[in-house]
Image (spheres, rainbow, N blue to C red):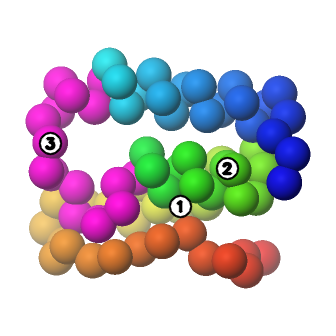
Amino acid sequence: REVIFPDTFLLNIVDIYTSYISPMFGKGKCGYYISCSNYARESIKRYGFLRGFFMSVDRVMRCHQFQKETRDDPPYAWW
């Protein structure tokens, strides 16, 4: 899949979050095996800006600190 401007813009935002904001919260606090930022990156690369964005928001909304650690990869077929 070809990566276009909106995709790269959103991927850059995820990279900035991963590099500068996430380290302030500490490591190892995510309840999912693949972190939300990695999930977002994979979703955007696989499905593009719009679907990747909504999949990432859905993932973040499902995340909370009281869940058990589970594996949650981006699906290969999504709406």
Q: Position of residue 42 (x, y in %)?
A: 58, 55
Q: CA distance from mark 3 to mark 2?
A: 23 Å
Q: CA distance from mark 1 to mark 3?
A: 22 Å
Residue 19 shown in magenta: no
Marks 3 and 2, the one that precedes in the sequence: 3
Side (left or right) of 6 relative to 27 = right
The region drawn magenta spans 21-36
Element assignment for label 3: loop
Q: Which mark is residue 58?
A: 1
Which residue in the protein does label 3 denote?
27
Marks 1 and 2, the one that precedes in the sequence: 2
Q: Residue at x 79, y 31 (%)?
A: 6
Q: What residue type is disc 2 on?
A: Ile
Bin the neighbour count of mark 2 within 10 Å (Cα to Cα): few under 14, some 14-19, many 20 and up. Answer: many
Which residue in the protein does label 2 denote?
44
Bin the neighbour count of mark 1 within 10 Å (Cα to Cα): few under 14, some 14-19, many 20 and up. Answer: few
Marks 1 and 3, the one that precedes in the sequence: 3
